[in-house]
Image (spheres, rainbow, N blue to C red):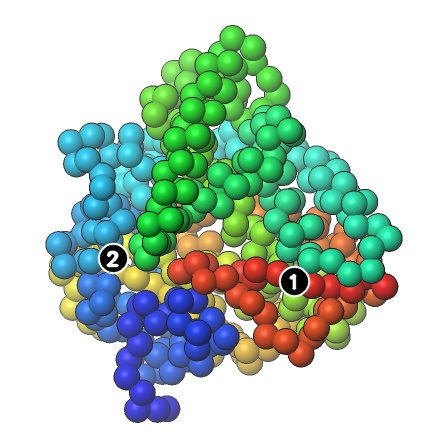
Amino acid sequence: MTDRPIPSLLQLTPINEEFRVDPHVLLDDLRTRCPVHKDPMSGSVVFSRYADVRGIVNDRTLWRDPMRAEEGAFLNRGLVADVDPNLPRSSTTSILMLDDPDHGRVRQPLAQALYARVAKFRGEVERIVDESLDALEGQAEFDLMDRFCVPIPIDVIASILGVDRGMLAQFRQWSEDLIQALNPFRNPEQTKAMEIASTALATYFTDSMADRRVSPKDDLITDMVTLQAEGAELSDDELRINLIALLVGGNLTTTDLIGNAVRLLLLNPDELAKLKADPGIINGLVEEVLRYEPPVDITGRVASSDRELGGCPIKQGQALMVSLRAANRDPEVYDDPHRFNVTRKHKPHVAFGGGSHICIGAPLARLEAQVALVKLFQRFPDLKLARPEETPEWRKLPFFRGMERLEVLAQ
């Protein structure tokens, strides 16, 4: 317990060095002293207890679209400041920020096609992982983020989408630039790169959709234009926006899931030994990584009516920000929450959010992490951190947690 000021939402991002080094110093204190509070900087109500967070993300009556937030919800309104309110909302954003009925109408066929692809994609994920590992053979030291954690997710989602392999590097750059759309604190240079990537990806997917209608391929783009032709109520704008969102959403967060997992295992050799002794624990291990060091810090909702949440009165239109990271280490739910325990008895985490807006890419992210981690430590059983005493260089992108680099020794 401390007398420190309640941190603003901005201070609960990697922009703040204290949070970047160890977010739980701030989050534990916040969850104990003030688990529900109004944040003047963002104009939102912030929740950090597991019970409140899980209840909010699973509440299908709440809104997701930041355009429905009150004028004083500065962070939410900033995300949509440049959106033309006269355009159909589904033509200006993906399912990430849509509400029903548009959300369900667009998400259902997309989920149907994506999950069918994921269900039969393990072999391709294994091939991509093996290819990345082959390129590392014989090297004594390398940056695992650059050589393994970054390329695998982009190669996987690109393969699902049917992207030409020669375009993978370009796709990776576009994806990294476009994710700045979720950064309300981006600078002019980041905004310019984001806009260039947005235009380039829109052109690419427009051309690809037209091509698949003439020459179908075994890929998700073909699946979607086929569903569209068979009667799925999807416009070309909606299809293009959501294919782009899959690319972006499936890139950075899965990269960070794999990178964070490797670092945790190398820092906890007893836990790594459990995986080496029994690779069959990998599913539970990935869930523990998602609980302990999730790639995403927060998500949001908007109150659709006056109500009480977390014991506090909430009025319609108020923005609700929930700390997934704080909830996942709540001692009211998890025994010894700051211990990384790969055989922990499963209790649902909230790393993927919940309810109708639960991360659509969660099954693919889990599959990629499961395959990548098992194969990495089978191929390099003696892998070590090159400089274990150093604090990682965490990226400064708000609301996400991942490393710039992860230098390792393979021999």
Distance CA(mark 1)–CA(mark 2)? 32 Å
Q: Which quadrant would residue 75 be assigned to in this image? A: bottom left
Of the 4 image quadrants, the one containing the C terminus is: bottom right
Q: What residue sits right under mark 1 in the picture?
A: 406
Between disc 1 and disc 2, whose residue precedes? 2
Rate crowding at label 2 as few (under 14), some (14 to 19) or many (20 or more) other CA atoms within 10 Å: many
Q: Position of residue 257 (x, y in %)?
A: 58, 56
Of the 4 image quadrants, the one containing the N terminus is: bottom left
Rate crowding at label 1 as few (under 14), some (14 to 19) or many (20 or more) other CA atoms within 10 Å: many
**Could one spot residue 54 in this view of the protein?**
no
Amino acid type shown at disc 1: Leu
Q: Nearer the viewer, residue 326 or 281?
A: 326
The disc at residue 75 is 2
Q: Nearer the viewer, mark 1 or mark 2?
A: 1
The disc at residue 318 is none
User: From the viewer's perspective, is 12 left or right of 84?
Assistant: right
Q: Position of residue 26 (x, y in %)?
A: 40, 79
For the residue labelled by badge 1, is the local secondary structure a helix, a strand or a loop? loop
Q: Which quadrant would residue 169 be assigned to in this image? A: top right
Q: Residue at x 54, y 45 (%)?
A: 251
Amino acid type shown at disc 2: Leu
Up/down of 404 relative to 20, above or below: above
Q: Residue at x 16, y 68 (%)?
A: 313
Q: Residue at x 57, y 47 (%)?
A: 365
